[in-house]
Image (cartoon, rainbow, N blue to C red):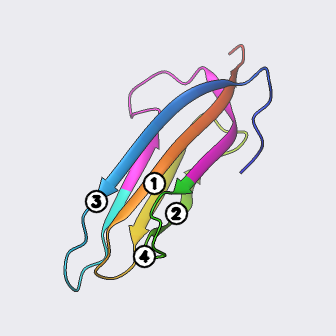
Amino acid sequence: MGQPKLEDYLLFKMDIFKFGIPLIKRKSIIEYPEPGIARYYVIMAIAVRDTMLNDTGGYASIAAGGIGQRFVRIRLWSQKESSFAFSIKVYGRHVAR
């Protein structure tokens, strides 16, 4: 979502992988910034890339916050019985409070 520009900073980067479990959908919630951390940047772009190469990867959605906000909560989940692997990047700009 969004397109990072030259003046945007890479605020957060994470690679996450979870193994598949029979009959189960794997789930994870990623938050930036972590709860309790000051929020000095406005989010300008979010990139979530499924890195599974065999079409058995997962899905991602923004559960809260996002572009134009100072936080984001990203929900990740796998297909049933499958692993998931994502690369997540959040870009933003410093703004005065």
Per the rendering, the mark at residue 9 is: none
Amino acid at pointer 3: Lys
Mark 3 neighbour density, 10 Å: few (under 14) some (14–19) many (20 or more): some
Give the foreground label among 2 and 3. Answer: 3
Tell me if 75 is positioned left or right of 11 in this view: left
Return the x and y of residue 74 as percentages of the image width and height: 50, 53
Check disc 2 and report its element: helix, strand or loop: strand
Mark 4 or mark 3: whose residue is earlier in sequence: 3
Q: Which residues are magenta?
A: 29-48
Mark 3 or mark 1: whose residue is earlier in sequence: 3
Mark 2 or mark 3: whose residue is earlier in sequence: 3
Amino acid at pointer 1: Phe
Q: Between marks 3 and 1, how big is the CA–CA gap?
A: 9 Å
Name the residue tied to disc 2.
60
Tell me if 54 is positioned left or right of 90 in this view: left
Give the foreground label among 4 and 2. Answer: 4
Q: Relative to 70, say whether 72 is above or below.
A: below
Amino acid at pointer 4: Thr
Amino acid at pointer 2: Ala
Check disc 3 and report its element: helix, strand or loop: strand
Any magenta on residue 97? no
Name the residue tied to disc 3.
18
Q: Relative to 73, say whether 26 is above or below.
A: below
Return the x and y of residue 34 as percentages of the image width and height: 40, 33
Image quarter of the C terminus = top right
Per the rendering, the mark at residue 56 is: 4
Name the main secondary structure of what is drawn in magenta: strand
Mark 2 neighbour density, 10 Å: few (under 14) some (14–19) many (20 or more): some
Tell me if 2 is positioned left or right of 26 in this view: right
| Circles 4, 1 touching at the beta carbon (< 8 Å) | no
Return the x and y of residue 67 as percentages of the image width and height: 70, 44
Residue 21 can be seen in this image: yes
